[in-house]
Image: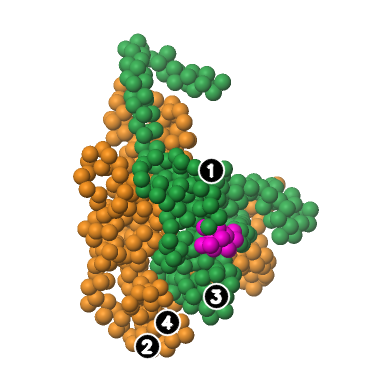
Chain colours: A orange, B green
Amino acid sequence: MASVELVRMPARRRQTSIPKRLWADRWCYIFMLPALVLIVMFSFYPIVASWFYSLLDWSGIGGDRTFIGLDNYREIVGDPFFWDAFRRSFYFMFATVPFEVGFSLIVAVILNDRALRFGAVFRTFFFIPVVTTTAIMSIVMSFVFGAFNGPVNGALIGLNILDTPIDWLGDPDTALWTMALIGIWKWFGQPMIYWLAALQTIPQDLYEAARVDGAGSVHIFRTITIPLLIPFAIIIVLIIAVGNLSVFALIQAATNGGPFFATETMELYIYRNAFGANTGSFTDPRLGYASAAGIIFGVCIMVITALLILARYYSRRRDFGRDRKAIL
Amino acid sequence: MTDLVRGSSRDYPAQTREGEQRSSVARWRRSGQVRRLVTYVVLTVVCLIWIYPLLWMISASFKTEAEIFSGLSLIPQSLQWENFRRAWVDANIGDYFINTVIVTISSVLIVVFTTATMGYVLGRHDFIGKRLIIGLLGALVFLPQGYTIIPVFDLITALRLDGSLFGIILAQSGSAPIIMILLFAGYFRGIPRELEESAVLDGASFPRVFFQIMLPLSKPVIATTIILQFIASWNDFLVPLVLTLSRPELRTLAVGVYSFQGENFTSWTDMAAASTISLAPVIIVFLFLQRYFIEGMAGAVKQ
């Protein structure tokens, strides 16, 4: 019965005209409408609009908009604050991604061991920072790393590792790296969950068999776990890298980009240029200029994304062959 | 019971192989016990360090100003409930809390409804333009938020929604529910056709099939969507920050605590109390529904 239906339906459809098919499927379009309206308004339109905005001299909502062509882009290329922020975004990414992705894999492998008791409890502990409100947790962390008797300085001095307290977030030399440390702590659980999901796709029998053959844990990890995880690894690195390049709330709430712009990454630079005047900064709002900076940075992120997706495609084709690729 | 099953499955290879291999398994198990003990100790220490900042925040919210920075101890000398009263009333955290609850619940309802209906259509039906829509969704997944906030801000202002919480609710509901649409689509695709077909033969309309048969079957995905959106919405910072720049009375907790620190920072105990009030609901919701949350997140990688 069901198979007859499945065969019959496409045949019937091919014969009917396009308006008839549109009418027959009217409920499909009606059901998609609410989500599509929201996505078009708040995801799709903003992309298109920001390309247009980047060509304007525009000092705030309600203010005059003047079309100035590529002048914003020309000015950005010569703006040292832009390049500093650009560099800092990548420093932040390179400081966080290896630790977040690498250490979380080790923790995930340990937690994935079926013989480990309380694995779910440990997992929850590691994951809790991820679900806390970034802006609020970041303010709390700015006090944990406080210069005067903050718990971190307190503990390090108590353990005789430090003689004098470090002004972790107040010193331009340490501020960005301290923010990276806080970022690693905050988001460590996210790649860990991804790794656990990936590890669960590997059959346990494979490990059992290897152990029976006398393989050690490191050997098993190198020859079984890692090769099977590579396609996942690329996607995980991609998600975590893009997330860290786009860091905003974490740094804005803790330092506002200071001291002396030492923690101003790209998203903070864009925010300061677009909305800084509202919050008492010395710059005038420049929505067109900020849009142009956002587009340059957005294009960079898309290029990185495209390269990693290409890498994933080739690693899959090499390791799994055609039939596997067709399934995935 | 579970131990029995687990034990027997682990013994299985050892019993069937040669004696030489059996002894290697035994050696592996013995060294495994020592290693396991070390693993437990290390994991416990790391986990305690991991949640120390949260415990520190909670304990600080019960301490006196002088007590906070006087040592690493987490136990307050006496519980200063007054901190919470001052944060709730004087620092407007009470108002921000209500705003956040309204925004979060509304956006959860909107997102569950819109993603379920769209996921259902994409997962179970063929129609003209389906490939176009799937392509559009795919392109939007890795969109960086920073440079879309300006048009969103402009759009909300142009629609005159900037005077109410509705602007924040809409912007949050529309930002990126694509993962949830894919989750629904994948789930609905897996439901056997017979269920739907018998209802259609009985003359049930399209919406009726969805609301009476399909939607009730998708409870696990609904739970995942609720908790993903609850946490995303409760924690959102950039959208409410930008949309409330000139309207402090509409602030959500994330923006409220941030502004509290910037504008009238008087006492760290009140700050800690405000943070504890703000984080408690999201942590409690996570602890109770974490299975659904983790499944939802894991789904993003498996796709």
Q: Which residue is mark 1?
A: B287
* Marks 1/4 same chain: no
Q: Dot 2: few (<14), some (14–19), or many (≥20) neighbours within 10 Å? A: some
The one nearer the camera, A97 or B71, is B71
Magenta stretch: give its range. B87-101
User: Which label was assigned to residue A67?
Assistant: 2
Looking at the rendered structure, the kind of residue marked 3 is Asp
Look at discs 3 and 2 and give the one toward the viewer.
Answer: 3
Look at discs 2 and 1 and give the one toward the viewer.
Answer: 1
How far apart are the alpha carbons under marks 1 and 4?
Answer: 42 Å
x 44%, y 77%: residue: A49
Percent of width and height locating residue A302: 35, 64
How far apart are the alpha carbons under marks 3 and 4?
Answer: 15 Å
Q: Count numbered badges in the picture.
A: 4
* Marks 4/2 same chain: yes
**Secondary element type, mark 3:** loop
* Marks 3/4 same chain: no
Label 4 resides on the chain identified as A
Q: Quadrant of residue A83?
A: bottom left
User: Which label was assigned to residue A256?
Assistant: none
* Marks 1/3 same chain: yes
How far apart are the alpha carbons under marks 2 and 1?
Answer: 52 Å
